[in-house]
Image (spheres, rainbow, N blue to C red):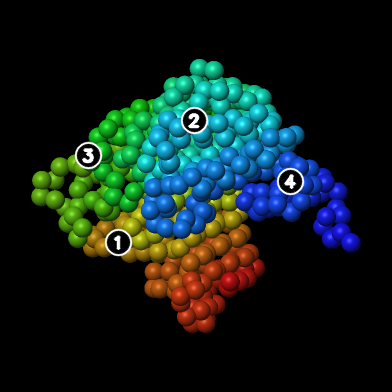
């Protein structure tokens, strides 16, 4: 009597095998001729990941062996009668044989999959590979490919004949791709909707950094540019990279709906009309520390708040994001990193009015200040939801009345007390306030008191207590704070 699985139609079994790891699906070929000849060719999703291979000894793990390569060769051979391959993923970890042989073998694997009408191609070669893999020009043309991911030590050198008329999603994180070739690739993807550009350590390859500085495409709806932002970056230590920052960043994407952009600030931005943009996530970083500007934006102060004897004006902060900020003024949702708050303060000449902004999310840390918060909140007249990931931030004299902190400089502290202007929070129409990572320290309690005592339209306050804190004590303190809004309810998460 046949087992219940074998009684299923070939098409159903083929779908099931496609959902299994490729190694498991291939192993079913030993069950019977039916599984080998009829069912295995129906597998349309292949994933080869050498990082999951367990080698018998350390030498093979470090230097490679024929095990993985032989497995890929045999599996593709078994699938030579396959009518179609929809998805092909390859993670190559170690090299075997000579560089030329290995490069030819990897390109042959990819080509074999592409000949089957491939829809998705995902390639990854980590840095431990030792040698770079060249993508042959023939692999840069496909009438069927819809999604393409290339990352790691893959190099694209020849792009004149590249053409992907059906490609809608492209992810690139490469060590060798200059601005010209990147532009040629974009031009060859007329219906592209999602573009992700990623690169890591900025000391590794300066040429790659420039790739994200010019994006011009009519159909892109989702743009993600990811840069590794070291904590201690100084342009005096990376002059070659800084030379790139003197250039102008240019974004021309009229169909853009979502923008996720992380980068050091550039000297200038040329950004076209982004009227379709709904959501923006910005992680912008200054090239230099702003500690000397904690008490004054014009003169140098030391870490104790005392003016330097030379009384010379401090050098200007590099970068100008005014055009970029103005271009996103019609969004409804904005996410800002701690560094972005400082960039908005020091590098934005004029703040636009965000009339459509309903949701504002702020991430805080104790190294970065809230100098721009008063101006930012005043520029969001219709804000409904205000979200904070952490309330602890660096105390400066420029936080204004958006926070309850006291500056360290005595003279500046007195001047802050003398200000009797209406608090910016009192004109804020926020109905929902969400706080996460709340620990209940003195600064957090005072900031929470400041919010609850000035936001008169509040209806809901959601507080996520940090898991390492005494939740009962923290909850009791929050619930005891006075509320200006009589309609407000507090939810402790």
Distance of mark 4 from mark 3, alpha carbons?
62 Å
Q: Residues within 10 Å of mark 2 (few under 14, many from 20)?
A: some
Residue 293: x and y in percent read 26, 50
Q: Residues within 10 Å of mark 4 (few under 14, many from 20)?
A: some
Quadrant where the C terminus is found in the figure = bottom right
According to the picture, the residue beneath numbered tag 3 turns out to be 236
* Mark earlier in primary sequence (4, 1): 4
Observer-side mark, 2 or 1, equals: 2
Tag 2 near tag 4, CB within 8 Å:
no
Q: Which mark is residue 104?
A: 2
Q: Secondary structure at mark 4?
A: helix
Image vertical order of residue 61 relative to residue 69, above or below: below
* Mark earlier in primary sequence (2, 4): 4
* Mark earlier in primary sequence (4, 3): 4
Residue 244: x and y in percent read 33, 30
**Which of the pair 13/488 is nearer the observer?**
13
According to the picture, the residue beneath numbered tag 4 turns out to be 36
Distance of mark 2 from mark 4, alpha carbons?
28 Å
Distance of mark 4 from mark 1, alpha carbons?
74 Å
According to the picture, the residue beneath numbered tag 1 turns out to be 407
Residue shown at 46% from the left, 35% from the top: 102
């Amino acid at each position: 009597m046949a087992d219940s699985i074998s009684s299923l139609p070939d098409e159903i079994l083929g779908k099931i095998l496609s959902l299994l790891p490729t190694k498991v699906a291939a192993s079913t070929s030993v069950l019977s001729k039916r599984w080998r000849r009829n069912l295995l060719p129906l597998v349309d999703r292949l994933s080869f990941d050498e990082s999951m291979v367990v080698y018998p000894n350390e030498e093979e793990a470090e230097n490679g062996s024929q095990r993985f390569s032989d497995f890929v060769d045999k599996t593709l051979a078994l699938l030579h009668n396959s009518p179609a391959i929809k998805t092909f993923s390859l993670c190559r970890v170690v090299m075997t044989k000579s560089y030329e042989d290995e490069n030819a073998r990897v390109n042959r694997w990819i080509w074999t999959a592409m000949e089957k009408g491939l829809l998705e191609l995902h390639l990854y070669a980590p840095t431990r590979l030792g040698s770079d893999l060249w993508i042959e020009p023939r692999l840069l043309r496909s009438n069927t490919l819809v999604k393409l991911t290339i990352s790691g030590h893959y190099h694209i050198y020849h792009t004149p004949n590249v053409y992907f008329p059906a490609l809608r999603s492209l992810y690139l994180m490469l060590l060798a791709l200059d601005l010209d070739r990147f532009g040629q690739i974009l031009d060859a993807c007329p219906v592209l909707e999602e573009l992700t550009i990623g690169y890591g350590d900025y000391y590794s390859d300066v040429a790659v950094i420039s790739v994200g500085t010019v994006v011009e495409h009519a159909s892109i709806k989702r743009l993600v540019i990811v840069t590794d932002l070291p904590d201690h970056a100084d342009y005096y230590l990376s002059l070659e990279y800084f030379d790139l920052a003197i250039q102008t960043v240019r974004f021309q994407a009229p169909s853009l709906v979502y923008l996720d952009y992380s980068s050091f600030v550039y000297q200038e931005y040329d950004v076209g009309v982004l009227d379709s943009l709904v959501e923006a996530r910005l992680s912008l970083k200054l090239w230099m520390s702003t500690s000397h500007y904690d008490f004054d934006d014009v003169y140098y102060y030391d870490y104790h708040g005392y003016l330097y004897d030379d009384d010379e004006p401090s050098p200007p902060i590099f970068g100008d994001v005014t055009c970029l900020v103005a271009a996103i003024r019609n969004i409804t949702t904005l996410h800002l990193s701690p560094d972005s708050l400082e960039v908005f303060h020091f590098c934005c000449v004029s703040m636009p009015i965000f009339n459509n902004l309903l949701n504002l999310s702020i991430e805080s840390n104790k190294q970065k200040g809230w100098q721009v918060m008063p101006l930012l909140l005043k520029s969001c007249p219709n804000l409904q939801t205000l979200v904070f990931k952490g309330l602890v931030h660096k105390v400066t004299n420029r936080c204004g009345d958006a926070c309850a902190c006291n500056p360290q400089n005595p003279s500046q502290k007195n001047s802050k007390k003398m200000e009797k202007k209406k608090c910016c929070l009192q004109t804020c129409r926020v109905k929902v306030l969400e706080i996460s990572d709340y620990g209940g320290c003195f600064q957090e309690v005072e900031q929470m008191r400041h919010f609850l005592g000035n936001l008169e339209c509040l209806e809901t306050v959601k507080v996520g207590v940090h898991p390492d804190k005494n939740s009962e004590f923290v909850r009791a303190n929050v619930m005891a704070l006075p509320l200006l809004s009589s309609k407000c309810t507090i939810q402790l998460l």
